[in-house]
Amino acid sequence: MHLASCRSRSFPTDSTDEAYLKAYPSMAEAKQALGQYFAFFNQCRRHQGIGNQTPDALYYAEQESALAA
């Protein structure tokens, strides 16, 4: 998912909304929708508990620090 798509996407604020409140027509559509949501959640959505960073930004910053050490 690219940053431009982060700005244009709108997903529920609670991850359970996407998983439990929808009846998907097929398993393939459920996997696709949830994959898109998790990409948004990890790459685009900023989380207050980790300093308003995205989980990906935090993870990759830690990986770079470990490699530099």
Image (spheres, rainbow, N blue to C red):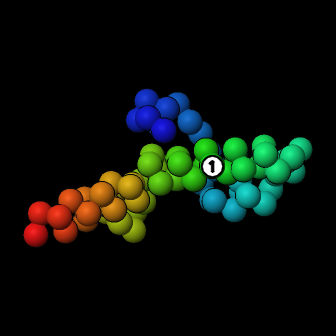
Kindly identify the amino acid type of the residue bearing the numbered disc 1. Answer: Gly
Is disc 1 surrounded by few (<14), some (14 to 19) or many (20+) residues within 10 Å? Answer: few
7 left or right of 33 in image:
left
**Residue drawn at 33 percent across, 54 percent down:** 57
Depth check: give the residue in front, 69 or 41.
69
**Residue drawn at 26 percent across, 63 percent down:** 63
Quarter residue 64 falls in? bottom left
**Residue located beneath label 1 in the image:** 35
- Callout 1: SS: helix
4 left or right of 39 in image:
left
**Residue drawn at 78 percent across, 60 percent down:** 20
| 58 over 33 or under it: above or below | below
Task: Name the residue at the left extreme.
Answer: 69
Quarter residue 16 falls in? bottom right
Residue 29: x %, y % from top left = 78, 43
Q: Is residue 52 in sight in this rendering? A: no
Q: Is residue 45 in sight in this rendering? A: yes
